[in-house]
Image (spheres, grey):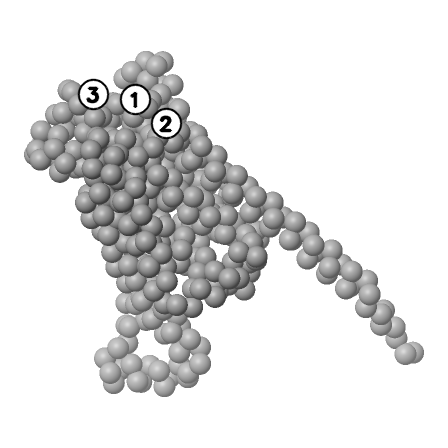
Amino acid sequence: MLLKTFGWSFAVTAAGLALAGVLWGWKGLAIVGILSILEISLSFDNAVINAGILRKMNAFWQKIFLTVGILIAVFGMRLVFPVIIVAITAKMGPLEAVDLAINNKDKYEHLVTAAHPAIAAFGGMFLLMIFLDFVFEERDIKWLGWLERPLAKLGKLDTFSIVIALLALLVTAMTFATDVAHGGGDKSATVLLAGVAGLLTYLIVGGISGYFEDKLEEDEDDDEDGDESEKAAAGAQKGQGATVVGMAGKAAFFLFLYLEVIDASFSFDGVIGAFAITNDIFEMALGLGIGAMYIRSLTVYLVRRGTLDDYVYLEHGAHYAIGALAAILLVTIKYEINEVITGLIGVVLIGASYWSSVVRNRREAEAEGADAESKPEVTSGV
């Protein structure tokens, strides 16, 4: 199971480190290794969130997530995206931006770093909405009941999460964005625009994927409740014989897009933080790409082992980690926060939720054992 799931990650690691050693020597090999560890530590909570979504998909879409998805994650977000950001912010052509990234690394680093306020506002708002929609939703299983019960009551107001997110964006623009650490000057307008774009992206992609997911569940319920022959005849009359199949494909497709946007939001801080180690885009893409591969393999591993069903508080811990990351992204518009702190916060929250799950499982096992012992033994009347 372990080798089957992580086999490609191990192979990519070996090939990537070997390539780094050949191209850049021992120093390059060390840099790529450090970047890989950085990406894994920063995105471990991403794997838990992804697993919660990926388990709703079939095996085909899980494979798409590991193949097409990893290409988007590695080449799209870790290599192409920073170049596009430079091209847009510096108002230059894509080829000119690529030439700058290869031949003038210091200026390229400066331009990418200067774009951090917009990147942080977009990613921070997207992740904040994921966190808010989670904590404001009524759930049967609660980890921090003293906090989650009142939040679930507030969440009965349909637009409450949007109101809170917009208030957070407004406060950020009026405080942190007035004198930013990256690029200098007043970036209030930029932060507001990017933050609203992040919010709209969440509402559009998340809303569409949720709509098709709900429709699919409704169609599946209809299949269970009705007679198969009657449904087939009705479908033939209405010309809707393939509706369920089509809805399943659309639902999975938009969930896949949702996953990719989540991954993009998580990758922002990793890309910016990587400049503290290297400003070579190829070393960065290789190191962060190896880390991203492990995150994807870990996601599939969690799904196939049913880990989220066994350790029910893991999703809670991951969402709290997302909330912390969203807040950190907004704060870093003005203040520097070491990536180690960001990674440790996520690890601590997920570790605490894991341990709480273990304790819960032990208590339930002990309770079941006590119930079994208290039942009177049934004897034969013969």
Residue 24 falls left or right of residue 371? left
Q: Position of residue 141 (x, y in %)?
A: 55, 60
Q: In which quarter of the image is residue 67?
A: top left
CB contact under 8 Å: marks 1 and 2? yes
Quick one: SS at disc 1? loop
Marks 1 and 2, how far apart at CA: 9 Å
Q: Nearer the viewer, mark 2 or mark 3?
A: 3
Kindly tell me whether residue 83 is visible in this rendering. no
For the residue marked with disc 1, what is the amino acid?
Thr
Residue tagged 1: 278
Q: Position of residue 66 (x, y in %)?
A: 35, 45
Quick one: SS at disc 2? helix
133 in relation to 169, above or below: below
Quick one: SS at disc 3? helix
Q: Nearer the viewer, residue 78 or 105?
A: 105
Q: Nearer the viewer, mark 3 or mark 1?
A: 3
Q: Position of residue 28 (x, y in %)?
A: 32, 18
Residue 35: which numbered mark, if any? Answer: 2
Q: Of the residues under marks 1 and 2, which one precedes in the sequence?
A: 2
Residue 193: which numbered mark, if any? Answer: none
Residue tagged 3: 106
Q: Which residue is drawn at 36% across and 74% down?
A: 219
Q: Where is residue 241 in the image (x, y as percent from the top left)?
A: 28, 76
Marks 3 and 1, how far apart at CA: 10 Å
Q: Of the residues under marks 2 and 3, which one precedes in the sequence?
A: 2
Name the outermost residue toward the right. 382
